[in-house]
Image (cartoon, rainbow, N blue to C red):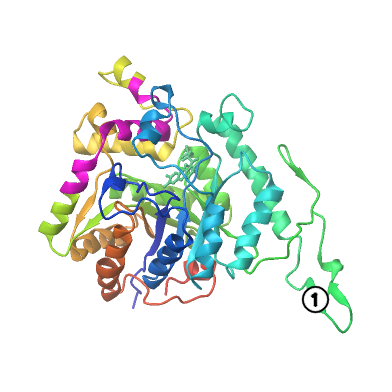
Protein backbone atom coordinates (compact mmCIF):
# COMPACT_ATOMS: atom_id res chain seq x y z
CA UNK A 1 0.00 0.00 0.00
CA UNK A 2 1.44 3.41 -0.89
CA UNK A 3 1.69 5.79 2.04
CA UNK A 4 -0.14 9.07 1.77
CA UNK A 5 2.36 11.91 1.56
CA UNK A 6 2.61 14.01 4.69
CA UNK A 7 3.19 17.72 4.44
CA UNK A 8 5.63 20.04 6.16
CA UNK A 9 4.54 23.34 7.69
CA UNK A 10 6.82 26.29 8.36
CA UNK A 11 5.75 29.62 9.86
CA UNK A 12 7.00 32.78 8.14
CA UNK A 13 7.86 35.27 10.87
CA UNK A 14 9.11 38.80 11.35
CA UNK A 15 10.38 40.57 14.43
CA UNK A 16 7.70 43.18 13.92
CA UNK A 17 4.01 43.60 14.60
CA UNK A 18 3.40 44.16 10.89
CA UNK A 19 1.94 40.87 9.72
CA UNK A 20 2.78 39.93 6.18
CA UNK A 21 -0.61 40.95 4.80
CA UNK A 22 -0.47 44.66 4.02
CA UNK A 23 -2.44 46.51 6.68
CA UNK A 24 -2.94 43.39 8.82
CA UNK A 25 -1.09 45.11 11.66
CA UNK A 26 -4.08 47.46 12.08
CA UNK A 27 -6.35 44.56 13.03
CA UNK A 28 -7.51 45.19 16.61
CA UNK A 29 -6.62 41.61 17.62
CA UNK A 30 -2.95 42.09 16.68
CA UNK A 31 -0.73 43.33 19.54
CA UNK A 32 1.57 46.19 18.53
CA UNK A 33 3.90 46.88 21.42
CA UNK A 34 5.29 43.48 22.42
CA UNK A 35 7.94 43.14 19.69
CA UNK A 36 10.75 43.45 22.24
CA UNK A 37 9.14 41.18 24.82
CA UNK A 38 10.65 37.68 25.21
CA UNK A 39 7.17 36.40 26.10
CA UNK A 40 5.98 37.19 22.54
CA UNK A 41 8.54 34.79 21.11
CA UNK A 42 8.08 32.14 23.77
CA UNK A 43 4.31 31.96 23.41
CA UNK A 44 4.65 31.92 19.62
CA UNK A 45 7.18 29.07 19.78
CA UNK A 46 4.95 27.05 22.13
CA UNK A 47 1.96 27.63 19.86
CA UNK A 48 3.86 26.44 16.76
CA UNK A 49 5.33 23.43 18.52
CA UNK A 50 1.93 22.49 19.98
CA UNK A 51 0.64 22.48 16.39
CA UNK A 52 3.62 20.30 15.27
CA UNK A 53 5.03 22.87 12.81
CA UNK A 54 8.39 21.79 11.40
CA UNK A 55 9.85 25.21 12.02
CA UNK A 56 9.38 28.93 12.29
CA UNK A 57 11.76 31.18 10.42
CA UNK A 58 12.35 34.90 10.53
CA UNK A 59 12.61 36.72 7.24
CA UNK A 60 15.06 39.60 7.51
CA UNK A 61 16.68 42.44 5.61
CA UNK A 62 19.51 44.78 6.39
CA UNK A 63 17.96 48.15 5.56
CA UNK A 64 14.70 50.10 5.49
CA UNK A 65 13.42 49.69 1.92
CA UNK A 66 13.41 52.94 -0.03
CA UNK A 67 12.96 51.97 -3.67
CA UNK A 68 9.34 53.17 -3.97
CA UNK A 69 9.49 56.91 -4.81
CA UNK A 70 13.10 56.86 -3.60
CA UNK A 71 12.14 57.21 0.07
CA UNK A 72 11.29 55.06 3.09
CA UNK A 73 8.01 56.86 3.85
CA UNK A 74 5.48 54.58 2.21
CA UNK A 75 7.13 51.33 3.28
CA UNK A 76 7.96 52.11 6.89
CA UNK A 77 5.41 54.86 7.44
CA UNK A 78 2.49 52.67 6.43
CA UNK A 79 3.61 49.52 8.25
CA UNK A 80 5.77 47.48 5.87
CA UNK A 81 7.61 44.42 7.05
CA UNK A 82 10.88 45.43 8.60
CA UNK A 83 12.75 43.70 11.42
CA UNK A 84 12.49 45.76 14.59
CA UNK A 85 14.77 43.35 16.45
CA UNK A 86 17.69 41.23 15.29
CA UNK A 87 16.09 37.79 14.82
CA UNK A 88 19.23 36.12 16.21
CA UNK A 89 18.15 37.52 19.59
CA UNK A 90 14.62 36.08 19.33
CA UNK A 91 15.58 32.56 18.22
CA UNK A 92 17.42 31.38 21.38
CA UNK A 93 14.47 32.70 23.41
CA UNK A 94 12.21 30.46 21.33
CA UNK A 95 14.64 27.56 21.72
CA UNK A 96 14.42 27.84 25.49
CA UNK A 97 10.63 27.47 25.42
CA UNK A 98 10.52 24.42 23.14
CA UNK A 99 12.25 21.12 22.39
CA UNK A 100 11.32 20.09 18.84
CA UNK A 101 10.41 23.18 16.80
CA UNK A 102 12.92 24.09 14.08
CA UNK A 103 14.28 27.64 14.28
CA UNK A 104 15.29 29.48 11.13
CA UNK A 105 17.41 32.61 10.73
CA UNK A 106 17.82 34.61 7.53
CA UNK A 107 21.44 35.63 7.05
CA UNK A 108 23.06 37.20 4.01
CA UNK A 109 26.04 35.63 2.25
CA UNK A 110 26.82 38.98 0.62
CA UNK A 111 27.23 40.97 3.82
CA UNK A 112 28.64 38.40 6.25
CA UNK A 113 31.92 36.55 6.43
CA UNK A 114 31.77 32.75 6.65
CA UNK A 115 33.39 32.68 10.09
CA UNK A 116 30.60 34.88 11.54
CA UNK A 117 27.92 32.84 9.81
CA UNK A 118 29.29 29.45 10.82
CA UNK A 119 29.77 30.55 14.43
CA UNK A 120 26.31 32.20 14.89
CA UNK A 121 24.39 29.42 13.21
CA UNK A 122 26.48 26.71 14.87
CA UNK A 123 25.77 28.35 18.22
CA UNK A 124 22.03 28.37 17.52
CA UNK A 125 22.23 24.69 16.61
CA UNK A 126 24.09 23.97 19.86
CA UNK A 127 21.70 25.80 22.21
CA UNK A 128 18.61 24.42 20.45
CA UNK A 129 19.82 20.82 20.51
CA UNK A 130 19.99 20.56 16.72
CA UNK A 131 17.04 22.64 15.52
CA UNK A 132 18.72 25.47 13.63
CA UNK A 133 18.06 26.38 10.02
CA UNK A 134 19.68 29.01 7.82
CA UNK A 135 17.59 30.82 5.24
CA UNK A 136 20.46 31.62 2.89
CA UNK A 137 19.92 34.92 1.15
CA UNK A 138 22.28 36.89 -1.02
CA UNK A 139 20.25 40.10 -0.37
CA UNK A 140 18.63 42.04 -3.17
CA UNK A 141 18.19 45.70 -2.31
CA UNK A 142 20.53 48.59 -3.06
CA UNK A 143 19.57 50.16 0.26
CA UNK A 144 21.16 47.11 1.93
CA UNK A 145 24.33 47.50 -0.13
CA UNK A 146 24.61 51.11 1.01
CA UNK A 147 24.71 49.97 4.64
CA UNK A 148 27.85 47.99 3.83
CA UNK A 149 29.86 50.53 1.90
CA UNK A 150 28.67 49.64 -1.59
CA UNK A 151 26.78 52.04 -3.89
CA UNK A 152 24.53 49.24 -5.22
CA UNK A 153 24.04 45.48 -5.04
CA UNK A 154 26.49 43.35 -6.98
CA UNK A 155 24.72 41.62 -9.88
CA UNK A 156 22.84 38.42 -9.23
CA UNK A 157 25.42 36.05 -10.80
CA UNK A 158 28.18 37.52 -8.67
CA UNK A 159 26.06 37.31 -5.53
CA UNK A 160 25.26 33.64 -6.11
CA UNK A 161 28.91 32.92 -7.00
CA UNK A 162 29.92 34.44 -3.67
CA UNK A 163 27.15 32.50 -1.93
CA UNK A 164 28.62 29.25 -3.29
CA UNK A 165 32.04 30.25 -2.01
CA UNK A 166 30.65 31.23 1.41
CA UNK A 167 28.78 27.92 1.69
CA UNK A 168 31.92 25.97 0.84
CA UNK A 169 33.81 27.84 3.55
CA UNK A 170 31.02 27.46 6.14
CA UNK A 171 30.73 23.75 5.47
CA UNK A 172 34.46 23.31 5.99
CA UNK A 173 34.28 25.33 9.23
CA UNK A 174 31.39 23.25 10.56
CA UNK A 175 33.37 20.11 9.72
CA UNK A 176 36.54 21.38 11.35
CA UNK A 177 35.59 19.73 14.66
CA UNK A 178 34.84 16.02 14.92
CA UNK A 179 31.92 15.11 17.15
CA UNK A 180 34.29 13.50 19.68
CA UNK A 181 36.73 16.43 19.83
CA UNK A 182 35.53 17.74 23.20
CA UNK A 183 36.74 15.23 25.78
CA UNK A 184 36.25 17.16 29.06
CA UNK A 185 37.99 14.48 31.11
CA UNK A 186 38.74 15.96 34.57
CA UNK A 187 40.70 12.93 35.77
CA UNK A 188 43.12 12.90 32.83
CA UNK A 189 43.16 16.69 32.51
CA UNK A 190 42.22 16.45 28.83
CA UNK A 191 39.69 19.06 27.76
CA UNK A 192 39.86 18.62 24.01
CA UNK A 193 41.45 16.14 21.63
CA UNK A 194 43.16 18.53 19.26
CA UNK A 195 43.89 15.76 16.74
CA UNK A 196 40.16 16.00 16.03
CA UNK A 197 40.15 19.75 15.35
CA UNK A 198 41.54 20.89 11.98
CA UNK A 199 42.33 24.08 10.12
CA UNK A 200 40.32 24.52 6.92
CA UNK A 201 42.53 26.86 4.87
CA UNK A 202 39.72 27.86 2.52
CA UNK A 203 41.05 30.10 -0.23
CA UNK A 204 38.15 30.88 -2.55
CA UNK A 205 37.45 33.52 -5.18
CA UNK A 206 35.56 35.69 -2.66
CA UNK A 207 36.40 34.55 0.87
CA UNK A 208 39.45 33.24 2.69
CA UNK A 209 39.38 31.64 6.10
CA UNK A 210 41.97 29.60 7.95
CA UNK A 211 39.87 28.01 10.69
CA UNK A 212 39.27 25.91 12.63
CA UNK A 213 35.94 27.23 13.91
CA UNK A 214 36.04 28.36 17.52
CA UNK A 215 33.00 26.36 18.63
CA UNK A 216 32.48 22.59 18.63
CA UNK A 217 30.48 20.55 16.17
CA UNK A 218 26.76 21.07 16.69
CA UNK A 219 24.12 18.35 17.03
CA UNK A 220 23.09 18.51 13.36
CA UNK A 221 26.69 18.96 12.18
CA UNK A 222 25.44 22.02 10.39
CA UNK A 223 22.10 23.84 10.34
CA UNK A 224 19.42 22.85 7.84
CA UNK A 225 20.03 24.93 4.70
CA UNK A 226 17.00 26.77 3.36
CA UNK A 227 16.80 28.98 0.30
CA UNK A 228 14.19 30.92 -1.61
CA UNK A 229 15.71 31.94 -4.93
CA UNK A 230 13.91 30.91 -8.09
CA UNK A 231 15.87 32.53 -10.93
CA UNK A 232 17.83 30.04 -13.07
CA UNK A 233 21.00 30.84 -11.08
CA UNK A 234 19.05 30.64 -7.82
CA UNK A 235 17.82 27.17 -8.78
CA UNK A 236 21.36 26.04 -9.57
CA UNK A 237 22.38 27.18 -6.09
CA UNK A 238 19.38 25.49 -4.44
CA UNK A 239 19.97 22.24 -6.31
CA UNK A 240 23.48 22.09 -4.87
CA UNK A 241 22.88 23.20 -1.29
CA UNK A 242 19.28 23.55 -0.16
CA UNK A 243 17.42 21.06 2.01
CA UNK A 244 14.31 23.24 2.11
CA UNK A 245 13.23 25.64 -0.61
CA UNK A 246 10.53 28.29 -0.41
CA UNK A 247 8.63 29.17 -3.55
CA UNK A 248 5.73 31.49 -4.20
CA UNK A 249 3.99 30.22 -7.37
CA UNK A 250 0.62 31.74 -8.21
CA UNK A 251 -0.81 28.45 -9.47
CA UNK A 252 -0.53 24.74 -8.72
CA UNK A 253 0.82 24.11 -12.22
CA UNK A 254 3.60 26.67 -11.75
CA UNK A 255 4.47 25.00 -8.42
CA UNK A 256 4.68 21.56 -10.03
CA UNK A 257 6.89 22.91 -12.83
CA UNK A 258 9.24 24.55 -10.32
CA UNK A 259 9.52 21.43 -8.14
CA UNK A 260 10.12 19.11 -11.12
CA UNK A 261 12.79 21.48 -12.46
CA UNK A 262 14.53 21.59 -9.08
CA UNK A 263 14.47 17.79 -8.78
CA UNK A 264 16.05 17.49 -12.20
CA UNK A 265 18.78 19.97 -11.33
CA UNK A 266 19.44 18.14 -8.03
CA UNK A 267 20.06 14.95 -10.00
CA UNK A 268 23.06 16.61 -11.60
CA UNK A 269 24.56 16.91 -8.09
CA UNK A 270 23.81 13.29 -7.24
CA UNK A 271 20.99 14.32 -4.91
CA UNK A 272 17.65 12.54 -4.64
CA UNK A 273 14.36 14.50 -4.81
CA UNK A 274 13.68 13.74 -1.13
CA UNK A 275 16.88 15.55 -0.15
CA UNK A 276 15.19 18.93 -0.62
CA UNK A 277 11.61 19.78 0.34
CA UNK A 278 9.78 22.45 -1.64
CA UNK A 279 7.38 24.57 0.41
CA UNK A 280 5.04 27.09 -1.19
CA UNK A 281 3.75 30.13 0.63
CA UNK A 282 0.04 30.40 1.24
CA UNK A 283 -1.76 33.30 2.93
CA UNK A 284 -4.76 31.97 4.82
CA UNK A 285 -7.94 33.28 6.37
CA UNK A 286 -9.72 30.52 8.25
CA UNK A 287 -13.22 30.58 9.67
CA UNK A 288 -15.49 28.20 11.53
CA UNK A 289 -17.91 28.63 8.62
CA UNK A 290 -17.47 29.91 5.07
CA UNK A 291 -19.41 33.04 6.00
CA UNK A 292 -17.17 33.79 9.00
CA UNK A 293 -14.05 33.28 6.87
CA UNK A 294 -15.42 35.56 4.15
CA UNK A 295 -16.26 38.26 6.72
CA UNK A 296 -12.76 38.07 8.16
CA UNK A 297 -11.20 38.32 4.70
CA UNK A 298 -13.43 41.28 3.84
CA UNK A 299 -12.38 43.05 7.03
CA UNK A 300 -8.72 42.43 6.26
CA UNK A 301 -9.31 43.72 2.77
CA UNK A 302 -10.71 46.95 4.19
CA UNK A 303 -7.35 47.52 5.92
CA UNK A 304 -5.26 47.19 2.76
CA UNK A 305 -3.33 50.29 1.86
CA UNK A 306 -2.50 50.22 -1.89
CA UNK A 307 0.45 52.59 -1.39
CA UNK A 308 1.96 50.12 1.10
CA UNK A 309 1.41 47.25 -1.33
CA UNK A 310 3.13 49.23 -4.08
CA UNK A 311 6.02 50.07 -1.78
CA UNK A 312 6.36 46.40 -0.72
CA UNK A 313 6.11 45.06 -4.25
CA UNK A 314 8.65 47.64 -5.43
CA UNK A 315 11.26 46.33 -3.04
CA UNK A 316 10.41 42.69 -3.82
CA UNK A 317 10.47 43.24 -7.58
CA UNK A 318 13.46 45.54 -7.65
CA UNK A 319 11.45 48.15 -9.55
CA UNK A 320 10.19 51.56 -8.44
CA UNK A 321 6.55 50.90 -9.30
CA UNK A 322 5.70 54.56 -8.97
CA UNK A 323 7.96 55.35 -11.93
CA UNK A 324 7.14 52.14 -13.74
CA UNK A 325 3.39 52.72 -13.65
CA UNK A 326 3.73 56.33 -14.81
CA UNK A 327 6.19 55.57 -17.58
CA UNK A 328 4.77 52.37 -18.97
CA UNK A 329 1.14 52.33 -17.99
CA UNK A 330 0.14 50.37 -21.07
CA UNK A 331 2.28 47.23 -21.03
CA UNK A 332 5.13 47.30 -18.61
CA UNK A 333 7.73 44.59 -18.94
CA UNK A 334 8.38 42.64 -15.78
CA UNK A 335 12.09 43.12 -15.69
CA UNK A 336 13.70 43.75 -12.38
CA UNK A 337 17.28 42.71 -12.76
CA UNK A 338 17.91 42.49 -9.04
CA UNK A 339 14.49 41.65 -7.61
CA UNK A 340 13.06 38.45 -6.23
CA UNK A 341 12.51 36.26 -9.28
CA UNK A 342 9.71 34.36 -7.52
CA UNK A 343 7.73 37.60 -7.08
CA UNK A 344 8.29 38.66 -10.69
CA UNK A 345 7.14 35.22 -11.86
CA UNK A 346 4.12 35.28 -9.54
CA UNK A 347 3.04 38.69 -10.89
CA UNK A 348 3.18 37.42 -14.49
CA UNK A 349 1.33 34.24 -13.50
CA UNK A 350 -1.34 36.24 -11.65
CA UNK A 351 -1.84 38.64 -14.57
CA UNK A 352 -2.20 35.67 -16.94
CA UNK A 353 -4.48 33.61 -14.67
CA UNK A 354 -6.74 36.39 -13.33
CA UNK A 355 -7.07 38.59 -16.38
CA UNK A 356 -6.35 41.60 -14.12
CA UNK A 357 -4.08 44.29 -15.48
CA UNK A 358 -0.49 44.65 -14.31
CA UNK A 359 -1.32 47.98 -12.64
CA UNK A 360 -4.16 46.40 -10.69
CA UNK A 361 -2.14 43.33 -9.77
CA UNK A 362 0.77 45.21 -8.23
CA UNK A 363 -1.61 47.31 -6.10
CA UNK A 364 -3.19 44.22 -4.54
CA UNK A 365 -1.70 41.95 -1.88
CA UNK A 366 -1.39 38.29 -2.77
CA UNK A 367 -4.65 36.43 -3.15
CA UNK A 368 -5.88 34.95 0.11
CA UNK A 369 -6.97 31.36 0.55
CA UNK A 370 -10.19 31.86 2.49
CA UNK A 371 -12.46 29.18 3.91
CA UNK A 372 -13.15 26.56 6.52
CA UNK A 373 -10.47 24.12 7.64
CA UNK A 374 -12.00 21.46 5.39
CA UNK A 375 -12.00 23.76 2.36
CA UNK A 376 -8.41 24.90 2.89
CA UNK A 377 -7.28 21.32 3.60
CA UNK A 378 -8.83 20.29 0.26
CA UNK A 379 -6.64 22.84 -1.54
CA UNK A 380 -3.51 21.87 0.38
CA UNK A 381 -4.12 18.18 -0.25
CA UNK A 382 -4.62 18.85 -3.95
CA UNK A 383 -1.31 20.78 -4.20
CA UNK A 384 0.50 18.10 -2.21
CA UNK A 385 -0.74 15.05 -4.12
CA UNK A 386 -0.32 16.85 -7.46
CA UNK A 387 3.39 17.20 -6.76
CA UNK A 388 3.22 21.00 -6.61
CA UNK A 389 4.95 21.03 -3.20
CA UNK A 390 6.02 19.08 -0.11
CA UNK A 391 4.34 21.51 2.24
CA UNK A 392 3.59 25.13 2.96
CA UNK A 393 5.11 28.29 4.37
CA UNK A 394 2.40 30.12 6.24
CA UNK A 395 2.74 33.85 6.82
CA UNK A 396 0.36 35.39 9.35
CA UNK A 397 -2.37 37.51 7.79
CA UNK A 398 -3.13 38.63 11.35
CA UNK A 399 -0.53 37.98 14.04
CA UNK A 400 -0.79 35.74 16.04
CA UNK A 401 -4.42 34.96 15.11
CA UNK A 402 -3.54 33.13 11.90
CA UNK A 403 -1.32 30.69 13.79
CA UNK A 404 -3.95 30.21 16.51
CA UNK A 405 -6.54 29.42 13.84
CA UNK A 406 -4.17 27.04 12.06
CA UNK A 407 -3.46 25.23 15.36
CA UNK A 408 -7.11 25.08 16.42
CA UNK A 409 -8.89 24.48 13.12
CA UNK A 410 -6.60 23.46 10.27
CA UNK A 411 -4.00 21.17 11.85
CA UNK A 412 -6.62 18.80 13.37
CA UNK A 413 -8.29 18.56 9.96
CA UNK A 414 -4.98 17.77 8.24
CA UNK A 415 -4.15 15.21 10.95
CA UNK A 416 -7.55 13.56 10.55
CA UNK A 417 -6.79 13.11 6.84
CA UNK A 418 -3.37 11.61 7.60
CA UNK A 419 -1.69 14.56 5.88
CA UNK A 420 0.19 15.95 8.86
CA UNK A 421 2.09 14.58 11.85
CA UNK A 422 0.49 14.17 15.29
CA UNK A 423 3.87 14.28 16.99
CA UNK A 424 7.51 14.75 16.08
CA UNK A 425 9.27 11.61 14.81
CA UNK A 426 12.75 12.99 15.39
CA UNK A 427 14.71 15.18 17.73
CA UNK A 428 16.49 17.45 15.25
CA UNK A 429 14.96 19.57 12.52
CA UNK A 430 16.75 17.54 9.83
CA UNK A 431 15.32 14.31 11.24
CA UNK A 432 11.82 15.78 11.17
CA UNK A 433 12.23 16.98 7.60
CA UNK A 434 13.34 13.54 6.50
CA UNK A 435 10.59 11.80 8.43
CA UNK A 436 7.38 13.85 8.47
CA UNK A 437 5.91 11.44 11.03
C1 LIG B 1 9.30 33.13 0.41
C2 LIG B 1 10.53 33.98 0.24
C3 LIG B 1 11.16 34.53 1.36
C4 LIG B 1 12.30 35.32 1.24
N1 LIG B 1 12.85 35.87 2.35
C5 LIG B 1 13.91 36.72 2.21
C6 LIG B 1 14.45 37.38 3.34
O1 LIG B 1 13.98 37.24 4.45
N2 LIG B 1 15.49 38.22 3.15
C7 LIG B 1 16.06 38.43 1.93
O2 LIG B 1 17.02 39.19 1.82
N3 LIG B 1 15.56 37.81 0.83
C8 LIG B 1 14.51 36.97 0.95
N4 LIG B 1 14.00 36.37 -0.17
C9 LIG B 1 14.69 36.60 -1.44
C10 LIG B 1 15.52 35.39 -1.91
O3 LIG B 1 16.33 34.89 -0.89
C11 LIG B 1 16.42 35.73 -3.10
O4 LIG B 1 17.46 36.58 -2.75
C12 LIG B 1 15.66 36.40 -4.15
O5 LIG B 1 14.54 35.60 -4.44
C13 LIG B 1 16.51 36.66 -5.40
O6 LIG B 1 16.94 35.49 -5.98
P1 LIG B 1 16.20 34.87 -7.25
O7 LIG B 1 16.15 35.92 -8.26
O8 LIG B 1 17.05 33.69 -7.58
O9 LIG B 1 14.81 34.49 -6.83
C14 LIG B 1 12.86 35.58 -0.05
C15 LIG B 1 12.23 35.03 -1.19
C16 LIG B 1 11.08 34.25 -1.07
C17 LIG B 1 10.43 33.71 -2.31
Q: In x, y percent, where is residue 371?
A: 18, 58
Give the residues drawn in magenta, as a range.
Answer: 298-322
| Magenta segment includes 5 | no
The outermost residue toward the front is 33
Q: Is residue 196 left or right of residue 385?
A: right
Q: Report whether residue 15 is seen.
A: yes
> For this rendering, which residue is in front, 280 or 402?
402
Query: What's the residue at 81%, 49% (across, down)?
Result: 210
Crowd tier of the residue under label 1, counting other residues whose Cα lies within 10 Å: few below 14, some 14–19, many 20 or above: some
Query: What's the residue at 73%, 55% (across, down)?
Result: 173
Query: In the rendered image of this protein, does residue 114 appear above or below residue 194?
Result: above
The outermost residue toward the right is 188
Could you tell me which quadrant the C terminus lies in?
bottom left
Query: What's the residue at 52%, 52% (across, down)?
Result: 87
Query: In the rendered image of this protein, does residue 100 appear above or below residue 338?
Result: below
Q: Is residue 329 left or right of residue 236?
A: left
Q: Is residue 123 left or right of residue 279?
A: right
Q: Is residue 376 left or right of residue 319?
A: left
> For this rendering, which residue is in front, 93 or 195?
93
- The residue where tag 1 is placed is 183
Q: In x, y percent, where is residue 86?
A: 54, 49
| Magenta segment includes 310 | yes
The answer to which quarter of the image holds residue 113 is top right
Query: In the rendered image of this protein, does residue 148 appear above or below residue 221?
Result: above
Amino acid sequence: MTRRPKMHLVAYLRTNSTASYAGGWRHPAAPLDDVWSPERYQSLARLLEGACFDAGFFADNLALPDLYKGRIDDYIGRGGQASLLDPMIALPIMAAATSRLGLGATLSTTFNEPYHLARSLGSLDLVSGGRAAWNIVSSTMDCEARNFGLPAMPDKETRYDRADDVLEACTKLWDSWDAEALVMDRDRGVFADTSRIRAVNHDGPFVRVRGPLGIPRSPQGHPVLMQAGSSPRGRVFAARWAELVFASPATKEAGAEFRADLHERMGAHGRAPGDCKVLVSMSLVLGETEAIARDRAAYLDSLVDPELVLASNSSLMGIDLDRKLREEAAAPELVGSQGVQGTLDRMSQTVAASGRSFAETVRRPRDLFTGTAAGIADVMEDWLVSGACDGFVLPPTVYPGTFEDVARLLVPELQKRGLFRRGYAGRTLRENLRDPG
